[in-house]
Image: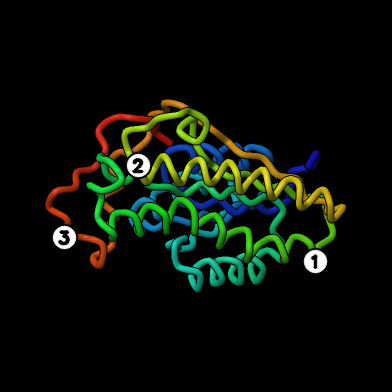
Amino acid sequence: MKEFKDKVAVITGAASGIGLGMAKRCIQEGMRVVLADVEQAALDRAEKELSAMGGTVLPVLTDVSRLHQVEALAKKTVEAFGACHLLCNNAGVSGMEGSIWENSQTDWEWVVGVNLWGIIHGLRVFIPVMLAQDTECHVVNTASTAGLLPYHPGAAYHVTKHAVVALSEHLYRSLAEKGAKIKASVLCPGFVKTRILSSSRNLPLEYQGNPAAKPMSSGSEE
């Protein structure tokens, strides 16, 4: 993409951290921005802040691990703005510390659900929309330096971020082979001042109850 003014950006995990930073830059470029996040209070604050910057924003409460909520996000985006030109699959959680066998089944399901399935859902739902538009579009998937390095203290986080890098490489090649007007990038940030290390605040009720698990206290933040 070379032109951004009046185009539409959809950003997940948009209410704080890197996602909010992306949203601010998109507003500065004159884009209309759909803010997707799982935290209603943070979403309300982000909407207020970005609107004060003069931006046109649409907040949508979204748990990216739930396919039907990502489908609803796309529907609301198209109904409001008629298109999606920039998709930032940015939502992510840190997960729990510990080795593969120390994390419970629900620990794994939560991290894989958000960090990997969240991006898969985003791609499967929004790519067809972009292809049908037949206009220049771009996809940015947020991974981490943990997706490039050989070790990270959180097993599930480490695994999912490597998977996001591989998924993004496959996406880039697949779009190129199709001759699509959509390009793709993977973002691998290192230490960034965000709230990802406290992401267990959003742990769904059905995933709670592993007394041995504790949220990560170190590692890459996004």
- At mark 2, the secondary structure is helix
Question: Residue 196 sits in which quadrant?
Answer: top left
Residue 101 in percent (x, y) is at 26, 48
Mark closest to the chain's N terminus, 3 or 1: 1
For residue 135, side relative to residue 130 (left or right): right
Three-letter amino acid code of the residue under disc 2: Ala
**Where, quadrant-wise, is the C terminus in this rendering?**
top left
Question: Can you tell which of label 2 and label 1 is closer to the viewer?
Answer: 2
For residue 74, the mark is none
Residue 77 versus residue 164 in the image, above or below:
below
For residue 209, the mark is 3
- At mark 3, the secondary structure is loop
For residue 132, the mark is 1
For residue 192, side relative to residue 11 (left or right): left
For residue 110, side relative to residue 122 (left or right): left
Residue 104 in percent (x, y) is at 24, 55
**Where, quadrant-wise, is the N terminus in this rendering?**
top right
Three-letter amino acid code of the residue under disc 1: Ala
For residue 61, side relative to residue 7 (left or right): left
The reply to whether dot 3 and dot 2 touch (C-beta < 8 Å) is no
Question: Can you tell which of label 3 and label 2 is closer to the viewer?
Answer: 2
User: What residue is rendered at 40% in x and 30% in y?
Assistant: 151
Q: Viewer-proximal residue, 4 or 63? A: 63
Residue 99 in percent (x, y) is at 28, 41
Q: How is the image coloured?
A: rainbow
Three-letter amino acid code of the residue under disc 3: Gly
Residue 159 in percent (x, y) is at 44, 44
In 3D space, how far apart are the residues under numbered discs 3 and 1 (Cα atoms)? 44 Å
For residue 155, the mark is 2
